[in-house]
Image (cartoon, rainbow, N blue to C red):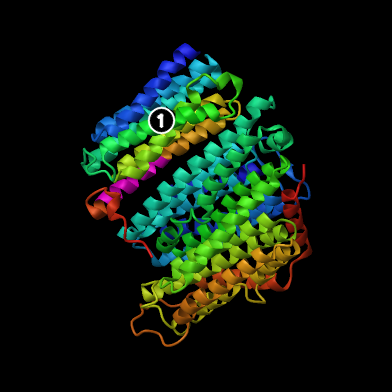
Amino acid sequence: MLELLLIFPLVVAAISLIIPNYQLRSWLLPVSGGLHLLLSISLAMEPFTLTGVWLGLDALSKLVLVVTSLLFFGCALYAVGYLEIRRDRGNKTMVPCLLIFLSAMTLAITARHLGLMWMAVEATTLSSAPLIYYNRNKLSIEATWKYLLICSVGIALAMLGLLFVAYGALDSGSPVSLQLDTLLAVAGTLSKPWLHAGFVFLLVGFGTKMGLAPLHSWKPDAYGEAPGLVGALLAGGLTSVAFLAILRGVQLMSAAGDGAMARQALLGMGLLSLFVAAIFMVRQPDIKRLLAYSSVEHMGLLAIGVGIGGLATFGAMLHLINNALTKGGLFLAAGNIQRAYSSKRLTEVRGAISVLPVSGTLFLAGFLAITGSPPFGPFMSEFTILRGIFANQRPFVGLLVLLFLALVFIGMGSTVLAATQGEAAAKTSDFRDRLLLCISPTAFILLVLLLGVYIPEPLQQALQNAAALLEVQP
Amino acid sequence: MMELTNPLLLTVILINFFTLGSARLVACIRIVAVQGALLALLPLAVHGFTAHAMLLSAGALIFKGVFIPLLLLRAIREVRIRREMEPIIGFVPTLILGALMTAGAFLFADFLPLAAEHHDGLFVPTALATMFSGFLLLITRRKAITQVLGYLMLENGIFILGVLLSEALPLLVEGGVLLDLLVGVFVMGIVMNQINREFSSIDTESLTALKE
């Protein structure tokens, strides 16, 4: 089953190369995305956990798998409409790269061997680089180069971290392996200095990929220059995958009895991310870069949630879903707005709601959701994380988080309100809202709204199981 | 084992210095290829002629010693550049920095809680020194191609450590890592070509339009 999930996108990618018909090739995306989603959900519904030597699914990876798959399906549907109006650029690289990207993300999520996971994460970097370069201009080439080089070097450091962890077993006489279950079983016997150094390098490496400050420098460039649907996939899907990789390190440290140290590191980076994001979001004139900094902010919140532990970990798991779906909706809506104004800067983008009633409204709603306004989902998850912080007797951390969230709300609000409200500038292109480009973002925002009001029992259970995996004591 | 690996590893360190001090790009690419090929001998020298070691050696030799350098040579032929001009830090200061870092790597490795069998070997210090040199290239050079070479040296350093831990890295993973590296250099080569087309040079200095 799992192997099927990995291989069929690759097969479809190969098929897409020989299909001559433009539209048919585009439609391969939602068809495989839908199939992937169905398979993922059916796998995640299985009550037991699949554990193999190479591939497996536990509560954490089930969660990330379904979220990523759902996001991909939505973006794939959007892609059909998007590629239709971008016939000048073509879809010959876009379609296979998106499918390889899907397969690589799935492998990174389901891998039980950390070396295999590493390889898959690097493959996501390589398959997404051509996607960022889709627009083929000076700015996108600069963004692609920075993304490729910074992420590749970062990932190389993560490999160093993995080797350090493996070296920790060499001295203690435990079996030398990077298989997750084996490692978790012998974690207590690993040599401490090597394990700690390994975790730090894992955090730096996968943290670069996730975009935690101060390793986020590629993020605004890449998200800003990539097409909206690629931004959505990177900000919602890839970041979650990188976060899962960091969580594997946290699991390992917890199993070795050093969970507290791992949590402290995550908490520090999380707070720094929130701070940096808040600073750069104030007076940000570019709506897509704004979303990129918002992504840095929410990666920070995830790190803080896990860094605090307990109730906050549960909140972070819920926030992972909310962030992925809201970012999906926001980036897709921002893509539509950019198309209508032929710009993503505040100097041109004004009064988006009057030009694009659906996309403009979605962008505004997405802003309210992502900044944690009730009744949207992120309000629930951010509130849970905050409750966890205060319940953990960390009032200072809690106040800092609240302060940064308020700053982000003001900064993001001034840009988003200026972009959506008021009179539209005279010159807009003749692009208007169309069905295929509005279904997915609408569905994402509605889902986020639903998650804010009601969390179904199975999901609640899944979140608890995922959080429980991170709370294991030796 | 020692009598074979030590000269190998010392040559690897010398190659680091050559790359740090040379302005001729073709020579740099070739010498990094030689470094990759030398490293391909390491698994055999350490583990003997086991199936795992032989396959890993063959893979590393083909990828690091042949395919990747060919890709890079093709890339610079297309963009028609030969020399690294005006590095951010001059060649002599980079060499001095490289020497300091290598010395530091040897001193630092003494403090590491290494397993008993690795205490006297050159493995860990060489791995560290090669990684540092890679970083130095990444930071101090302006040409995109030299930055890719820096990345390759970083990966070479990590490969040296990986040889010590071959139980932890099954062939499937090692193969995947090498394939990732190859595809990575391939994609970087394409991007480099596009940079050259857009900016008429592959100086990464021209990539400064995106900022706050």
Q: Pick the residue in front: A426 or B113.
A: B113
Q: Which residue is mark 1?
A: B102
Image location (x, y in percent) of residue B154: 43, 36
Q: Is residue A11 visible?
A: no
Image location (x, y in percent) of residue A15: 48, 47
Q: Could you say which quadrant of the image residue A348 lies in?
A: bottom left
Q: Check the image and name the residue furthest to the top.
A: B3
Residue at 72% x, 53% y: name it.
Answer: A466
Chain ID, mark 1:
B
Residue B172 lies, with reference to residue B46, above or below; the image says: below
Instruction: Rate crowding at label 1 as few (under 14), some (14 to 19) or many (20 or more) other CA atoms within 10 Å.
Output: many
Residue at 65% x, 48% y: name it.
Answer: A262
Residue at 67% x, 44% y: name it.
Answer: A1
Image location (x, y in percent) of residue A394: 70, 62
**Is B50 left or right of A97, judged from the image as shown?**
right
Q: Count how many numbered circles sit on residues in the image.
A: 1
Q: Pick the residue in front: A2 or A254.
A: A254
Q: Name the chief secondary structure element in magenta.
A: helix
Magenta stretch, residue numbers: B184-196
Residue type indicated by callout 1: Thr
Q: Check the image and name the residue furthest to the bottom.
A: A423
Q: Is residue B107 visible?
A: yes
Residue B133 belongs to the span the image colors magenta: no
Q: Could you say which quadrant of the image residue A289 lies in?
A: bottom left
Image location (x, y in percent) of residue A276: 50, 63
Residue at 50% x, 41% y: name it.
Answer: A157
**Is B32 left or right of A192, judged from the image as shown?**
left
